[in-house]
Image (cartoon, grey):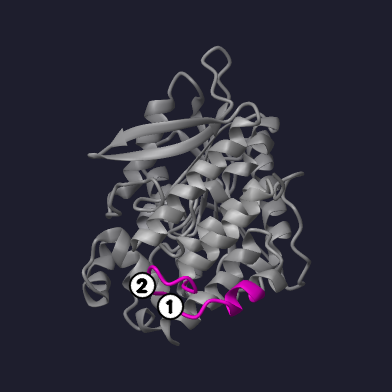
Amino acid sequence: MDHLAELKEFALLHARGQGMAPRRVERILTGITNDTCGDPRSWAATWTREGRTAASYGRLLDACAHFALARFPHHGDPAREAAGRLVVSTFDIWRERRRGIVRLELPYEGGTVAAWATGLDAARPRPLLVVMGGIVSVKEQWAPLLPLFARLGYAAVVTEFPGVGENTVRHTPGSWRLLPHLMDRLEGRAKVSDTSMLTLSFSGQLALRAATEDPRVRRVLTVGAPVGAFFTDPAWWPHVPGITADTLCALTGAPDRATLWSELPEHAMTAEQLRRVRIPVRYVASSRDEIIPTGEQHLLRALPDLRVKTFDDVHGSPAHLGAMRRWLVSQLLLTRITGRRTAAAAPTTEEDTARTHPRPTAFAPGERQS
């Protein structure tokens, strides 16, 4: 598949995951003829133009979604960098018209990590919820959920995977240390001793790795996270979409795919490490995942307290957005209320397979509104 065709295929999935109407997305994609920076019919120029139109009508979150697609899959050229800045500035206007969402900028390893947060309060610290997207999603895609998390009683922080969006730190095998660093910085404004991680795709691996070392991580919820097989199975690598491979090159600094594949095994977790994650782990799997190999399921069984929800879908289960988010939130609340820890209870491993195709629904009232 050529580059532009692959961009369009993945855009349909990511647009659906952001609540955009498929027909409208297809109309926009039809008008894109190239991915040449500066061409008015190019990828970034077309999506940016649509975003500006949405913003002119006051549909700010809709505009953010278009700008996020303009910089998809990563900010690899000036047009995409400009679109990335528009995502941030447009969301900033949206959140300033509301109350309770603040911006954080944290120095880390010579770079900067930015985040949107709510519920931070030194007088009444709440349990901390850290939300982090994967290798192609900016924090503004998830930040509209912050008011919901606040209503559920959390101090919530939405940030980005290393190298994505405003996170200027390169992705390395030690990137998991960003999460304990974030907890350190929020000490006193949130109850970091009771931290939940809602980490999507590749950031799920960072959360699991952090949980092996930091007892403050009390539960991990993730969607399609690579753990070991993705990083170690050379027979799988030729099947990985080019967009995924090229994005990982951009985030890690690998000069080409061959170098990337040779370095990936350093990121893998082992069964021994996973057995040390003695907290609830809730994992959404997709039966037709084109990025995460099925071999991950075998390794995940090493987790002492694991529940897996499987949808008949591709990576990230975009056709099951509403059902997936409801399951994750229900598991977040259940594990918090019951305080389930395998140190005090028998190990449990469950799989709940969903093969229906419900229409994606809103995660929270007003999520796609501005």
At x 70% / y 47%, what residue is drawn?
A: 367
Please say if 237 is above or below 140.
Answer: below
Kindly indicate the quadrant of the structure image that contains residue 181.
top left
Callout 2 secondary element:
helix
Q: Is residue 351 left or right of residue 217?
A: right
Q: Residue at x 61, y 65 (%)?
A: 15
**In the drawing, does residue 115 fall left or right of residue 281?**
left
Which range of residues does the magenta coloring cover? Answer: 26-42
**Which label was assigned to residue 89?**
none
Q: Are marks 2 and 1 in contact (CB under 8 Å)?
A: yes
- Crowding around mark 1 (Cα neighbors within 10 Å: few <14, some 14 to 19, many 20+) is some
**Which residue ends up furthest to the bottom in the rendered image?**
1
Residue ID for mark 1: 241
Q: Disc 1 marks which amino acid?
A: Pro
**What separation in Å lies between label 2 and label 1 (alpha carbons)?**
6 Å
x and y, in percent, of residue 211 in the image? 42, 44
Position of residue 322 measured from the top left corner of the image (x, y, whole percent): 72, 57
For badge 2, the amino acid type reads Ala
The residue identified by callout 2 is 245
**Closest to the observer, 76 or 224:** 76
The quarter of the picture where the C terminus appears is top right
Residue at 41% across, 73% down: 243
Q: Main secondary structure of the magenta part?
A: loop
> Quick check: 342 above or below 15?
above
At x 35%, y 50%, the residue is 162
